[in-house]
Amino acid sequence: MNPAQIEMTKPTVHVLCSPEVPEPAFQQLLYGLEEEGIPWETWTKTEGDALALAWTGAQASRLGVGVGMDGQNAVLNISKLDHERPLFQIPVRSLEQARILGANAARLVKKLPLKPLNREVRA
C-alpha cells in the first residue's frame, strides 16, 4: 500500500451536535476544551440524540473521546464504555456545566483527574 494513499486524521476530540444546540452552551463546551489545550473537531448532524452523537464521536475519534449535544443534553462518552452508559450527561441549559464537560473531555485525553460535575438533570 502506498503511504500517500493512507488518510490520517489528526487526533482530536470529536464534538457532534444537532442543529438545535443552544449556541452559548456549544461555545462554553469549546472553551472548556480550549482551556485544557486539546484539539477538537465539530460536526453538525441532523440525526441522533446527544447520547448517540457522543458514541459516534467517541468511536470515530483517534483519542477515543466524543461529545454529543442536542437541544436538551450534552453527553461525554469514551470508546471503551457502553453506548447506553456514558461517562457524563448534563442539561445544555447549564453553561457552567457545559464548560466543565468540555474540560473533562480534554482531561480524559491528558489522563488528569476530572473536575466535579453535577450529573443530575433537573427540570
Image (cartoon, helix red, strand yellow):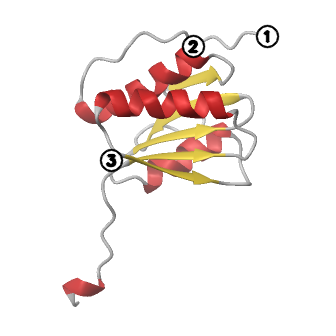
Tag count? 3
How far apart are labels 3 and 2 at the CA level?
Answer: 23 Å
Tag 1, which secondary structure?
loop
Other-residue count near label 1 (Cα within 10 Å), few / some / many at <14 / 14–19 / ≥20? few
Which circle's residue, 1 or 3, is located before the other in the chain? 3
Report x, y in % for residue 2. Answer: 21, 90
- Tell which of 79 and 119 is nearer to you: 119
How far apart are labels 1 and 3 at the CA level?
Answer: 33 Å
Furthest residue in direction right, as rendered: 123
Residue 123: quadrant of the picture: top right
| Amino acid at the residue labelled 2 | Arg
Tag 2, which secondary structure?
loop
Report x, y in % for residue 59. Answer: 46, 52
Decide: is 8 above or below 23: below
How far apart are labels 2 and 1 at the CA level?
Answer: 13 Å
CB atoms at circles 2 and 1 under 8 Å apart?
no
To which residue does mark 1 refer?
123
Tag 3, which secondary structure?
loop
Residue 122: quadrant of the picture: top right
Other-residue count near label 2 (Cα within 10 Å), few / some / many at <14 / 14–19 / ≥20? few
Q: Residue at x 57, y 13 (%)?
A: 119
Report x, y in % for residue 18. Answer: 70, 46
CB atoms at circles 1 and 3 under 8 Å apart?
no
What number is the disc on residue 63?
Answer: 3
To which residue does mark 2 refer?
119
Which circle's residue, 3 or 2, is located before the other in the chain? 3
| Amino acid at the residue labelled 3 | Leu
- Tell which of 2 and 34 is nearer to you: 34
Report x, y in % for residue 24. Answer: 63, 28
CB atoms at circles 3 and 2 under 8 Å apart?
no
Left or right relative to 100: residue 72: right
Left or right relative to 113: residue 46: right
